[in-house]
Image: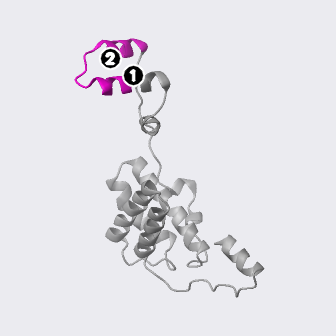
Amino acid sequence: ARARKTLAIQSGEPEAKPKTKDMFVSDYLEERVRYYLGRGQEGYARLVSSLNKWVLRYAHKMTIKTATKQQIQELFAPICRKLKPMTAKNSFLTLNPQLRAAERDGLIKHNVFVEFAAHEKPRATESERAYLTIEDIRRLAQTKASIEAVQQAFLFTCFSGLRISDIKELT
């Protein structure tokens, strides 16, 4: 948006007027989903779409211009009760870039997300992690697997340290 504005000024075109139309947050999030899909960012589009389902369920009448900190807190109260802490936190964090985009697009003058102090944002709880010992990995390597390729892929991740998503990129 900023680059387009700079090019327009340099070429002598009249400056585009900011959007003044108010719209429901759910409609704006739907626009953002289409935007991410158009850029090939399917994963992020799914995150925004998931957030939008909660908005439609708990804050369907909230508009982008009049959204307040209190409304967002009321939206996330049931989300935090119903979802796991990390999922609630990620949903909350997904909202900020959408509000920043609305601010850039001229739909809002102030991103209310910045009003949230750290202690007011949903937090993820520390998860308990268990690690395989070298003895565990040896036992797995010696065990007969029903699908040998899966076993080999798992052992490869153990020895390489690559995540499954990284391995999928290799093939």
Image quadrant assignment for residue 24: bottom left
User: Residue 79 in the image: x percent, y percent?
Assistant: 36, 58
Report the disc number at residue 155: 1
Assess whether mark 1 and mark 2 are in contact (beta carbons under 8 angstroms).
yes
Report the disc number at residue 137: none
Q: How is this picture coloured?
A: one colour
At horizontal 58% and vertical 65% (from top left) the residue drawn is 115
Q: Residue flagged by tag 2: what amino acid is it?
A: Leu
**Closer to the camera in the image, 77 or 168:** 168
Q: Residue furthest front?
A: 171
User: Residue 98 in the image: x percent, y percent?
Assistant: 51, 66
Q: Is residue 104 left or right of residue 98?
A: right
Q: Residue flagged by tag 1: what amino acid is it?
A: Leu
User: Residue 61 in the image: x percent, y percent?
Assistant: 38, 78
Compared to 41, does 153 lie above or below? above
Q: Secondary structure at mark 1?
A: helix
Q: Can you identify the residue that label 2 sits on?
A: 140
The residues tagged by marks 2 and 1 sit, at their Cα atoms, a distance apart of: 8 Å
Compared to 161, does 54 lie above or below? below
Q: Does the rendering let one see residue 136?
A: yes
State which region is magenta: 134-155
Q: Does the rendering let one see residue 112?
A: no
